[in-house]
Image: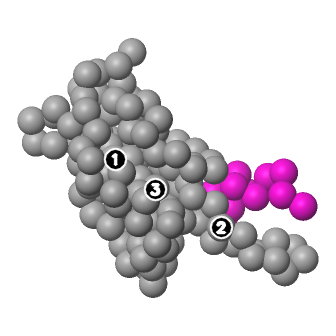
Amino acid sequence: MASGVGVNPKCLEAFQELKLGRKTKYIVFTLSPDNTEIVVEKTGPSTSTYDDFISELPEAECRWAVYDFDYEKEDGGKRSKITFYCWSPDDSKIKQKMLFASSKEALRRSLVGIASEIQGTDYSEIAYDQVLDKVSRGVN
């Protein structure tokens, strides 16, 4: 079910910068104050760590995010996967959860080049090792 919420063009610009320019490590998206469009809330520089990224996700509010997830394969090769996060903490308000859930596809469809998707309701579900396990599946 679509919510009718639009995607601000700055969301796509920020995503292209992350994907092609590698100047940013992550983007956190939220709804505008009037709930009519998805906007960029924050971006993190390419020097940001995974912990920096996680600290930007509020304990009791929903967000979407994209993170350029780097990891090493067992044979030593480096990999990078652009990962989409749907953050919907258990403590967030029901109305907000519903609005974010119904608006997710508009954002997700506009971001071409996402390799993995992570859904989290608490910090343990988006812990580095949990995400590493998911993004590295099927990689030899």
Q: Amino acid at mark 2?
A: Ser
Q: Amino acid at mark 3?
A: Val
User: Disc 1 vs disc 2: which is toward the camera?
Assistant: 2
Q: Are marks 2 and 3 in contact (CB under 8 Å)?
A: no
Q: Amino acid at mark 1?
A: Arg
Within 10 angstroms of label 2, few (less than 14), some, or many (20 or more) residues?
some
Query: Residue shown at 26%/22% (left/top)?
Result: 4
Read off the residue under disc 3. Answer: 66
- The numbered mark, 1 or 2, whose residue comes first in the sequence reads 1
- Quadrant the N terminus occupies: top left
Query: Residue shown at 16%/32% (left/top)?
Result: 36
Picture coordinates of residue 125 (x, y %)?
56, 51
Q: Quadrant of residue 43?
A: bottom left
Query: Residue shown at 32%/43% (left/top)?
Result: 62
The span shown in magenta is 129-140
- Residue 127 visible here: no
- Whether residue 39 is in magenta: the answer is no
Read off the residue under disc 2. Answer: 80
- 35 horizontally vs 75: left or right: left
Picture coordinates of residue 55 (x, y %)?
37, 67
Spatial CA span between label 1 and label 3: 10 Å
- 80 horizontally vs 106: left or right: right
- 35 horizontally vs 89: left or right: left
Residue furthest to the top: 1
Read off the residue under disc 1. Answer: 63
Q: Nearer the viewer, residue 59 or 140?
A: 140
Picture coordinates of residue 63 (x, y %)?
34, 47
Q: Nearer the viewer, residue 124 or 38?
A: 38
Picture coordinates of residue 35 (x, y %)?
16, 34
Q: Is residue 109 above or below residue 134?
A: above
